[in-house]
Image (tube, helix red, strand yellow):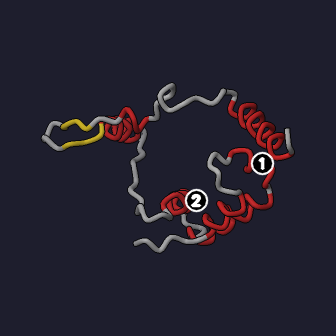
Amino acid sequence: MGKQGTSAKKAAQKKKQVSGKSSQTASENPSPKGKQQKQKNSRGKEVNHWVDTLGGELSAVGLRVKQVTGDGNCFFRAVADQLGNTISYVDLRSKVVSFMLQHRADFEPFMEDEEAFDTYCARMAKVSRSR
C-alpha cells in the first residue's frame, strides 16, 4: 500500500477512534432531516414538529430559537451571536480557519470529501457574499 493509502487508512482509524463509531451509511443512520415531517399546528400553519417541540422545551427554561440569516455565513454569525457579538462573524471565520490550519493533524482526518484540506480551508476563509 502506498503512502496515500496508508494516510487514508490512518485518518479513517483516527476518525473512528474519536467518534467511537464505525462509519454508517445514511440509510443505516438517518439524519434528523430525514425524519422531519411537515405537520399543521393548531392554527393550521405547516410546521416542522421538531422545531415546535424544541421551541417549547427551550421556552420552559427561558430560552428561545433565534433565526440567523442563511447566507453562507450563518454558522459564524450564530457562534458570534452566542459569544455576545464580542467578535464579528468575519473575524471569527478568519480565526477559525487559521486555527484549523495550525492544527491540521486534528482536523484533516475528518475530511469526508475528495477536497484537499488546504482547498477546503481556502474556501472556508472566503466570506459569503450571496445575500
Mark 2, residue position: 83
- As helix, strand or loop, the secondary structure at mark 2 comes to loop
Taking 78 as reference, is 131 left or right? left
Three-letter code, disc 2: Leu
Q: Quadrant of the N terminus?
A: top right
Crowd rating for badge 1 (residues with CA inside 10 Å; few <14, some 14–19, many 20+): few
Q: Residue sitting at 41 percent across and 44 percent down?
A: 62
Mark 1, residue position: 106
Of labels 1 and 2, earlier in sequence is 2
Can residue 93 be seen here? The reply is no
Vertical placement of 53 versus 4: above or below?
Answer: above
Vertical placement of 124 versus 42: above or below?
Answer: below
Q: Quadrant of residue 66?
A: bottom left
Q: Residue sitting at 30 percent across and 40 percent down?
A: 48
Q: Residue sitting at 73 percent across and 34 percent down?
A: 18
- As helix, strand or loop, the secondary structure at mark 1 comes to helix
Can residue 47 be seen here? The reply is yes
Taking 94 as reference, is 42 left or right? left
Q: Nearer the viewer, residue 94 or 129?
A: 129
Three-letter code, disc 1: Asp
Q: Residue furthest front?
A: 1
Q: Nearer the viewer, residue 12 or 93?
A: 12
Q: Quadrant of residue 5?
A: top right
